[in-house]
Image (cartoon, rainbow, N blue to C red):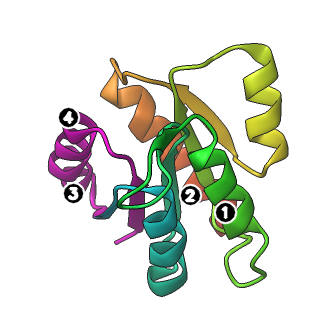
Amino acid sequence: MPNILLADDDDDMVEICSRLLPRRGHTVKVAQNAADAVASAEALKPDLILMDMRMPVSATGDVSDRAGLDAVLAIKAKPELAAIPIIALTGHMMTMFRAAILDAGCVDMLAKPIENFAHLTEAIELALKKSNSQ
């Protein structure tokens, strides 16, 4: 059963993923800020991370447009975590953001809000399949 770390402060996204992903055979753990995302990745070593790009930096921090990207960079900088596939979740689908997100090490990028849950699960399955074949 693949373990997924969902790093997102959006209560609706957390509720939907926590309810629907286990039906697909996934275990879901939640981090609601960038600092928790990095700490949870270190502790859990999940099979995949869904990372919101805009979230609080820490439990007491302000929301930042870069918090998720900075968390991705911190995770990818750790050799024991670098191979974990990360799918970025963002409301900014502009080309320049896509390039920065993919350059940081994300394997895919999905627009928020997620309107088609099947698209999310397909992206997860593809990322896990690619990760397992390496």
Residue topped by disc 1: 131
Please, what is the three-letter code of the amino acid marked with disc 1? Ser
Whole-percent x, y for residue 7 in the image: 42, 54
- When the figure is inspected, residue 3 is found, relative to residue 116, above or below; the finding is below
Asked whether the beta carbons under mark 4 and mark 3 sit within 8 Å of each other, the answer is: no
Estimate the spatial distance between the alpha carbons at disc 4 and disc 1, rounded to whole Å: 28 Å
Estimate the spatial distance between the alpha carbons at disc 1 and disc 3, rounded to whole Å: 20 Å
Which residue sits furthest top? 94
Label 4 vs 2, first from the N-terminus: 4
- Camera-nearest label, 4 or 3: 4
Q: Residue at x 70, y 13 (%)?
A: 94
- When the figure is inspected, residue 106 is found, relative to residue 113, above or below; the finding is below
Please, what is the three-letter code of the amino acid marked with disc 3? Pro
Residue topped by disc 4: 12
Query: Where on the picture, by quarter, is residue 131?
Result: bottom right
Quick one: label 3, few (<14), some, or many (20+) residues within 10 Å?
Answer: some
Asked whether the beta carbons under mark 3 and mark 2 sit within 8 Å of each other, the answer is: no
Does 2 lie within the magenta span?
yes
Does 87 lie within the magenta span?
no
- Camera-nearest label, 4 or 1: 4
Element type where label 3 sits in the image: helix
Q: Quadrant of the N terminus?
A: bottom left
Please, what is the three-letter code of the amino acid marked with disc 2? Leu
- Camera-nearest label, 4 or 2: 4
44 or 8: nearer the eye? Answer: 8
Whole-percent x, y for residue 133 in the image: 71, 65
Asked whether the beta carbons under mark 1 and mark 2 sit within 8 Å of each other, the answer is: yes
